[in-house]
Image (cartoon, grey):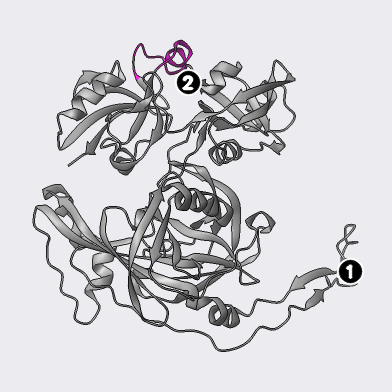
Amino acid sequence: MKMRLKPIAVSLATAGVLVAGLAAYQSSRAGILGFFDHKDTTVTAAASDTAAPAPQGANEKMPMMQAPNYRAIVQRWGPAVVGVTVEGTRHIDADDMAGDSNDPFFQFFRGLPGFQFRMPHQGDTPFRGQGSGFIVSSDGLILTNAHVVRDAREVTVKLADRRELKARVLGADPATDIAVLRVNAEKLPTVQFGDPKALQVGDYVLAIGAPFGFEQSVTAGIVSAKGRSLPGDTYVPFIQTDAAVNPGNSGGPLFDAEGEVVGINAQIYSQTGGYQGLAFAIPIDVALHAKDQIVATGHATHARLGVMVQDLDQALAESFGLSRPDGALVSSVEPDSAAAKAGIKPGDVITQIGSTPVKRAGDLSSTIGMSAPGTKVEVQVWRDKSTHEMQVALGSATADKGETASASGQENGRLGLALHPLTKDERAAVEVDHGLMVEDVSGAAARAGIQPGDVVLGINGQPARSVEQVRSVVSGHPKSVALLIDRNGQKIFVPVKLG
């Protein structure tokens, strides 16, 4: 099940720093005051004698919570937050070297004392990356983001007391961007988990991490929104905050006002690569679900319904006979998928999965993604202005059925596209006679800006008529491919670097 996503005006930058040959600068600080109790205060609206009568309820007292004791939270839980340094090698070509002097990370580090920047050589070049993490068990289990440890050959964890320990990556789940590390230590400080479902918009939150390598940096803000769906992250209902999160904060904890971890800071929405007031955290229940699977088996699995969905607006809702724009509108159904076998069709509006109401397309994606393959669920569908109930046996997100697969035919997915040939209804909808529907995006394709819902019309100047054809082109190990993409009726060529 994939979401049809509209183009976005600015890029989403993962909050992890990767700087070739650079040792990150670090600092640490912790508070020393204890907790104090929250106390309710009240405010009352004031009105002049000449003011118009106040509307009903305007003079009611509004409870107001006192700001949390952030210093106490940092003192109590800060020791469980760690810096994560990774080293490895990446292939660098001439295109990757262009424009480094304008990179915001280059500009930032260039001003630090003793920093000397050297242009990387082409070929396999060592890199050093910096992220964050936090300890979840006293015997050395640590959570961070999968993208922090991607391509890492060596991982080092720096504790709040400045001890440095080598870490082993137990496993990573790119679908939720969660990785689990293990260090050889005992009696380590740990965090306490909260309930992200109880978190409300406007609640206080606090982030601790290592932005730009400055470890144990603390920032605070509020919850800006919940249940955000972002391009390429269909399984995660992100918590949006305005806490200052920058590159290097990736993998660090997001605390609530009680000092409990409710999320993992993962992404920023930025035009510059730095903080602009939009940060996104993975809910801790999603992270722990992936963590438990990784600890038990070394990997995580996710269920798959096999539909592409989009949000409703009021006009669409009215056209389908709905009074409210609630639900996930099915725009396409994958052949031989769990949805197809259950009888779900394009034009259906999915309103409930099991006992979970579906208000937006992201609700469906996250609920299905957190389920186990093979699980039988009851799906409520709005069709022909009435509700229908269907029993669905969920498929596996990693299963390769028919022609729906990674277009590279390799587990690491050099191209990073999951595609299927257009159905008859999809061809009519996009008004083309051939093409491949993009179901999922990762890796090189995601970095190039391709999105779920795009239609691949051609590859390297040839019409794209089958997944096998795309596999064949990629199997020749080209450094890049040119894809002709149809997006919302507009055709554009997108270069995808594979080298």
Q: Measured from the top left, where is residue 276 in percent x and y?
A: 44, 61
Mark 2 → mark 1, Cα distance in angstroms: 65 Å
Of labels 2 and 1, earlier in sequence is 1
- Taking the spot 90% from the left edge, 72% from the top edge, the residue there is 49
User: Mark 1 belongs to which amino acid?
Assistant: Thr
User: Mark 2 belongs to which amino acid?
Assistant: Glu
Q: Residues within 10 Å of mark 1 (few under 14, many from 20)?
A: few
Q: Is residue 146 visible?
A: yes
Residue 434 part of the magenta segment = yes
Residue farthest toward the bottom in the current orientation of the protein? 32
- Nearer the observer, disc 2 or disc 1? 2
- Give residue 50's mark: 1
Which region shows up in magenta? 422-435
Secondary structure beneath label 1: loop
- Taking the spot 39% from the left edge, 51% from the top edge, the residue there is 171
Residue at numbered disc 2: 334
